[in-house]
Image (cartoon, grey):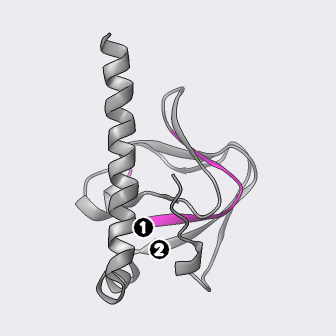
Amino acid sequence: MSENFLGSFRNGEEISLDAGQILFSKGDVGSEIYIVRSGELQILDGNQVFETIGPGGIVGEMALVDGAPRSATVRASVPSEVIPFNEKRFLFMVQQTPHFALRVMKVMSARLRAMNARLTGLES
């Protein structure tokens, strides 16, 4: 993903993750999205890595938007820092900065298209 969300989050508490540490697991209740401040996170299901996210990227947006359980597991592939972003802050950003919401939708759309492409490739 080319969207960089770090500029949207000036100050905040960071969560440090060791290499291999799980940020959240598939099926967890999701009440936050996370912006990758440093390092690298993998979005995966079992041993299948769907995407690797670097600094400025976001993870966890689907569960926050639709209220459903997490659809994948996210783990740090190297030591990483993330900035948590709860629903209240998310809604504030959407209200104050509509462009922010469009950027999140672009990320979600790109991920959906990538998954569709993977599934199409598997069916061939």
Residue 122 rendering spot, x and y as whole percentages = 36, 15
* Image side of residue 38 versus residue 71, left or right: right
Name which of mark 1 and mark 2 comes first in the sequence. Answer: 1
**Which of 107/33 is in front?**
107
In the displayed structure, 56 sits above or below 98; it is: above
Label 2 sits on residue:
85
x 40%, y 56%: residue: 107
Residue at the spot 58% in from the left edge and 78% down from the top edge: 7
- Taking 92 as reference, is 34 left or right? right
Q: Is residue 46 visible?
A: yes
Three-letter amino acid code of the residue under disc 1: Glu
Q: Residues within 10 Å of mark 1 (few under 14, many from 20)?
A: many
Q: Residue furthest top?
A: 124
**Residue named by callout 1:** 32
74 sits to left or right of 40: left
Q: Which of the 4 image quadrants contains residue 104?
A: bottom left
Write the start and end of the magenta stretch as one range.
Answer: 27-43
Picture coordinates of residue 113 (x, y %)? 33, 40
Inspect the magenta stretch and tell me whether residue 7 lies in it: no
Question: Disc 1 vs disc 2: Cβ atoms closer than 8 Å?
Answer: yes
Q: Secondary structure at mark 2?
A: strand
